Amino acid sequence: MSDRLGPSLASARRKLGRSLSEAEAATKIRGKMLEALERGEWDILPNEAYVRGYIISYSKFLEVDPAPLLKMYSEETGHLTNRERMRLPEQVVPSRERAHHIPWRTAAVIAGAAALIAIVIWGIGRFSSGPEPLPPVPNLPETSATTPASEPTVAVPAVSTDTPPADEGSSVVGDAPVVGEPFKLKVDVASDGASWLRVTIDGLKAYEGTLAGGQSKEWDVQEEATVRVGKPSSVTVSRNGETLAIPTAAETPQMTITATDPAPSSTQQ
């Protein structure tokens, strides 16, 4: 096998006696893209994620291992995978905010010392001023023997009729709040295709990359999931085993599935 990607693909196809038309029909990849792969014309191919998917699907058709071919692609184009990227060094010099930050233990000691000084000063001032004078005896009005004393008044506590506000962030139907239930999200790729995916679970990116044909992934979702699909025709998205419709778009569609609404809302970006 050649040490370059394009000639390696073309040589493997000729050994099997297959044509580009047969490869196009089997892989669902346009013949123009397959021809560009064999010639190494990277400028007319789509982005890196699609090209890696093409290579994996084409390798399955040619019955060869895709790993060496993907490595050739990285070396020839300079596109490195996450494992090939070098880790950036961690920050050694603290930021300006942390450099001027006072540790909480030091702050507690300073506050305690200030409180103790205030108590001592207050005690010294109280001791030097002597005992406080007794308050004067109030003058009580004389009650007449013929006039009965007024009966004491009993205060009745007021009863509030205000309705307590509902908790923010929850939907209320009647008297009961609507709470979403966690669900299981699954993405399957057809055995004869491949697709780039980006999945966000509860606000955090859970996966981004290319799944080859026959592969699948699952996630447990508490509130919301967002799925962006590169090749909708090769991908099936389901929630708790129920297949969801992926919108048709000119480019990569995006769909959002929430815990409170079983019907997914989709957007095109």
Image (tube, rainbow, N blue to C red):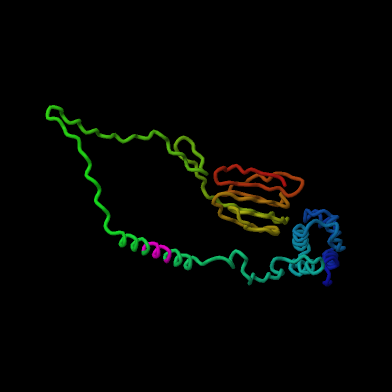
Residue 97 against residue 197 in the figure, above or below: below
Q: Look at the image and say whether residue 86 sits in the magenta stretch.
A: no
The magenta stretch spans which residues?
Answer: 113-119
In percent of the image, x 83 and y 72: which residue is there? 3
Point out residue 195 in the picture as x, y percentages from the top left corner: 72, 55
Q: Residue furthest left?
A: 145
Horizontal side of residue 182 vs 16, given as left or right: left
In percent of the image, x 71 and y 56: which residue is there? 196
Horizontal side of residue 252 vs 101, given as left or right: right
Point out residue 217 in the picture as x, y percentages from the top left corner: 62, 57
Horizontal side of residue 135 vs 93, given as left or right: left
Q: Quadrant of residue 34?
A: bottom right
Q: Quadrant of residue 56?
A: bottom right
Q: Residue furthest top?
A: 146
Residue 217 against residue 147 in the figure, above or below: below
Point out residue 55 in the picture as x, y percentages from the top left corner: 77, 62
In percent of the image, x 64 and y 43: which residue is there? 265
